[in-house]
Amino acid sequence: MIEEEIEDRIVIDSTFSQYPCAQQIVQSAYGSCTILNELLLDIFEANDKVNLTFSVDQNLNGNASTDPQFYFYPITKTMDVNISFRASYLNNVTDLSITRSTIHESVHAILVYMFEEGKLSTITGQADPDFSELFDAFIEYNRTSFTVNLNKTQHELMNNFINEMATSLSAYGNVAGYNLPFSYYRNLSYSGGILNSQTFKNSYPEYLNNLDAINNPSNRNPEHIKIIYDILSEQNNETEIYNYPDGTSYTATPKGKAINSANSPCY
């Protein structure tokens, strides 16, 4: 009975039927025992009025996306938070990239839930201890920001949880048998809209010398390039090489396994 309830609250819908290996990875990503995953499961397993749904979208822009608000169903009086993956992304990707995207979008889902439930609307009263770190960080950002773009706000906030996201990713990696440094999982966790956030740009500017953007555009910050190219290598499942003007280069090779999107075995 409990398994049925959990299945109803965190739903992998029928659009994943053609992507059984990707489905398996998504389930493994949110099933590992980490702080973020425990928070995700606490929210959606403990609340029979809110479901988290994972689906595949043939026409999605970007690798994955979380709808920025609940969808309410008047008949059942339940609400869904929807996470979608682009179909073509699932066709040519490593397991580490899918896991990274699942974790990233799950953080969005947590924040959408908290925002819609009013848990992020005030700094007075007692916050649920499970939400304390997210609560305080989000509220602190809103106190000092005039942004009205919730997605942008979330990506700024998510910079504060790179270590937590990397920990969830490393938990998957350890179970999968990878022996990778934590720094690699951190690099992968800077993904999606986080890369466009001002916080990321301040921490890892594209150019160490602003004049290089005009006078020497290939002379990009090595730390910036390392993050971008590590992400691309897993996303595209291929070696990515960046050549610097001094003749040196950075080579990023995928460390994850290419998935078989249609059939078993998955690798």
Image (tube, grey):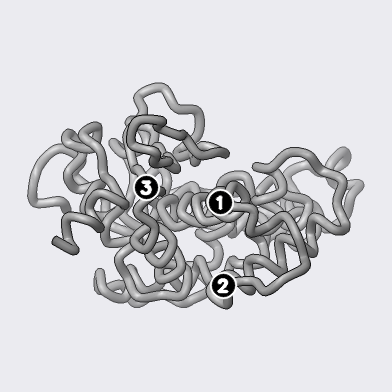
Q: Earlier in the sequence, mark 2 or mark 1?
A: 2
Q: Residue 111 placed where, x, y %?
A: 58, 54
Q: Amino acid at mark 1?
A: Ser
Residue 17 occupies quadrant: top left
Q: Residue at x 71, y 66 (%)?
A: 137
188 or 225, nearer to the observer: 188
Residue sitting at x 53%, y 74%: 130
Can residue 195 be seen at all in this image of the molecule?
A: yes
Residue underneath mark 3 = 51
Q: Label 2's element?
A: helix
Q: Do labels 1 and 3 touch, CB within 8 Å?
A: no
On the rendered structure, is 151 left or right of 240?
right
Q: Earlier along the polypeptide chain: callout 1 or callout 3?
A: 3
Q: Which mark is residue 165?
A: none
Distance, label 2 to label 1, CA atoms, is 13 Å
Residue of label 1? 191
| Residue occupying the far top of the picture | 59
Kind of residue at badge 3: Asn
Residue 169 seen in the figure: no
Along the horizontal axis of the image, is 87 left or right of 20?
Answer: right
